Amino acid sequence: MLINTGSPRSASVEDVRAYLTDFLTDPRVIDLPFVFRQLLVRGIIAPLRAPKSALKYSALFSPDGEALLVKETNALASRIAELSGGRPVYTAMRYGRGAVQEVLEKAVRDGVTGLRVIPMFPHYAMSSFETAMAHVRSEQARLSLPLQLTFPHPYFNHPLLIEAFAEKIAAAVRPHDRVLCSYHGVPLSQLRAYAGDPQRDYVLQTEETTRLLSRHPLLEALGLTFETVYQSRFGNGKWTEPNTQERLSELRDQGHKRVTVVCPGFLCDNLETVFEIGVEAKESFEKRGGELIFIPCPNHSDTLARALLSLSF
């Protein structure tokens, strides 16, 4: 079972607000006491962000009403099933009422007794990898289903994962380009407990992914310059740095006219990649006379499918 973050049911303000509420009231996403978290999200963040986010999401739904992230995750699952010789592969979304329950119940109806659950997050963070695992375990226990669940370790350094992103980068760059590897930002308050733990240190893992990409045979001879940056910051707390938008601004001030951005923390394209980088960051950089090359995620590439299939054994 592949478990991804999820998407609003539609791009309507009402559905986007419901999705944001579900997402942001998760204590592993905003780690405030229950009452303060509920008041903040339901009273301020979701109502204020929903109309703006709805406009962005409207560009990510196909004519048949399928969200880009869901579409690409389903296509990836289909490719894994083909490569596996027809083993059942399921997809679920962490946020969306009943989504995981429906998949677990379907697996039992299909006669499945053991399920390998793969969070679609290569790096360990409380707000992604950890919450996905915890939610699936909680749903399985609540439903008392006869399923043996297993989970992989974070796979930020898996050779085929690195290759999947290296293929995308190699197809887009020119020799000596500067490549920003932009990962989802995380509040520093969520990282302190895991500092120095190779299996749970988010910054250590993102930096290792960037290092491995820089040394991949498809890229090493091109003379590229790689940097690790972090996007999607909100609120007033301290987050992982450097921030993607701020670093792009600095590079333009330093005279860099062409920058390439890839997002190795996201396996399938979504609002954060397509819109935040491919639209907002690109427009901001190019208004100042630069050129920003946005590299899409591997999505349902054969290499990524083979990477995730290997994690199921």
Image (spheres, rainbow, N blue to C red):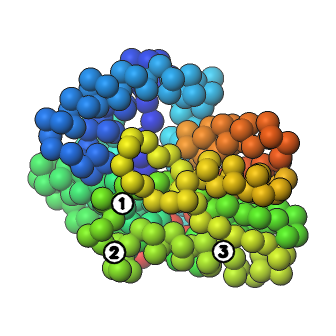
Question: Which residue, given by chain and number where applicable, does mark 2 sit on?
Answer: 195
User: Relative to residue 29, is residue 287 drawn left or right?
Assistant: right
Camera-nearest residue between 300 and 246: 246
Q: Nearer the viewer, mark 1 or mark 3?
A: 1
Residue 251 numbered mark, or none: none
Circle 1 residues within 10 Å: few <14, some 14–19, many ≥20: some
Pinpoint residue 41: horizontal percent, then vertical percent: 29, 31
Amino acid, disc 2: Ala
Quadrant for residue 114, please give it: bottom left
Q: Which residue is mark 1?
A: 188
- The kind of secondary structure element at disc 2 is loop
Q: At which x and y percent is residue 28?
A: 27, 51
Q: Residue at x 83, y 56 (%)?
A: 255
Query: Crowding at label 2, few (<14), some or many (≥20) Cα neighbours within 10 Å?
Result: some
Question: Is disc 1 placed on a helix, strand or loop?
Answer: helix
Who's the residue at 63% across and 27% down the image? 59
> Hey, what amino acid is under mark 3?
Leu
- Give the vertical position of 28 relative to 151 (above or below): above
The residue type indicated by label 1 comes to: Leu
Quick one: label 3 or label 2, which is nearer the N terminus? 2
Tell me what residue is drawn at x 31 percent, y 48 percent: 29
Could you tell whether 117 is left or right of 307 in the image?
Answer: left
Question: Which badge, 2 or 1, comes first in the chain's sequence?
Answer: 1
Observer-nearest of 236 and 68: 236
Give the Cα separation between the discs numbered 3 and 2.
23 Å
Q: Comparing marks 3 and 2, which lies closer to the viewer?
A: 2
Tell me the SS state at disc 3: helix
Alpha carbon of mark 2 to alpha carbon of mark 1: how far? Answer: 10 Å
Task: Decide: few, some or many residues near mark 3? Use Cα within 10 Å; few <14, some 14-19, many ≥20.
Answer: many
